[in-house]
Amino acid sequence: MECNLTVAIDDVHPAKGWGLQGDIQMDYLDKLHNLYGVKFTLFIPSNYHNESPLSKHKDWIDWLKSKDYFELAAHGHYHSCIDKKWGEAEFAELDDEIKSKDRIKQMMTEWEAVGHKPEGFRTPGWLCHPAAVGELEKHFKYVAVHYEHNRQQEWNCKTLYGADGINLNLNAYTSIHNEDTIMLQSHIAGEWNDNVWNEKNYNQLDSTLSHLISSHTIHFKTLSEI
């Protein structure tokens, strides 16, 4: 088998344990790149929980951009909701064009402040209101969505599907949703997800990649390179 393999990481933001220089999670990414040449797409909220505006962390963005195996992509603005029934599915509660445009403007202003224009987007919490879809697709070359949760949502930009986690063993990768590409999903940290960057999952992925490379031709890419 010959295929592309990409690793996507959600919720990266400038807080201890969530993507700062010196965090063990970032060390794991460096190790996998040095061992196998793995590339990563980091999905970054532009003001995570209204506590981490990118405009105040340009040095951090510059540090991430200095690693050519990282792609920096957008992952909403606040990554939180006013109506708690939506959890953190920020763009699910933005149910009209005006609300969506305003939130996107806030998001893109933060990215502009650090001198970076993300090519890709993933909705926080996977879900997205159709009114928000119509506005988001104007700003990005691609969206990365969940194979099941977003399968019926139509985007007028390139759409990439992912559902497999870095915590799964080799036998779990039963299908390729993007023609010739495996997208491995993960979260940088958090107590509510199984696919976070801890020692157990790092070792699992290390073992999986070692086996894949020994038996298949694997091309590591970021999502924008696919």
Image (tube, grey):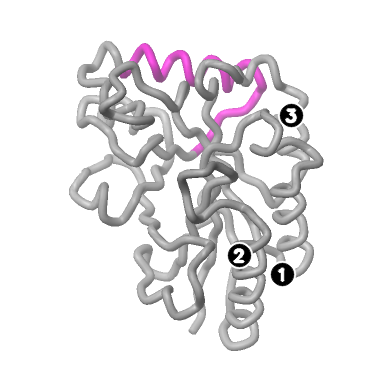
What's under tag 3, amino acid-wise?
Answer: Trp
Inter-mark Cα distance, 2 to 3: 24 Å
Residue type beneath disc 1: Tyr
Q: Which residue is under mark 3?
A: 60
Query: Element type at marker 1?
Result: helix
Q: Is residue 11 above or below residue 82?
A: below
Stretch of the chain drawn in magenta: 100-119
Give the number of the disc on residue 220. Answer: 2
On the image, the x and y values in percent for residue 12 come to: 59, 37
Count up the numbered dots: 3
Q: Residue at x 71, y 63 (%)?
A: 32
- The answer to if 76 sits in the magenta stretch is no
Residue identifier under label 1: 36
For the residues marked 1 and 2, what is the alpha-carbon distance in whole angstroms?
A: 9 Å
Q: Position of residue 80 (x, y in %)?
A: 41, 24
168 to the left or right of 206:
left
Look at the image and say whether residue 104 sits in the magenta stretch. Answer: yes
First in sequence: mark 1 vs mark 2:
1
| Labelled disc at residue 212 | none
Q: Secondary structure at mark 3?
A: helix
CA–CA distance in space, label 3 to label 1: 25 Å
Q: Are marks 2 and 3 in contact (CB under 8 Å)?
A: no
Q: Earlier in the sequence, mark 3 or mark 1?
A: 1
Mark 1 or mark 2, whichever is nearer to me: 1
Say if mark 3 contacts mark 1, CB within 8 Å. Answer: no
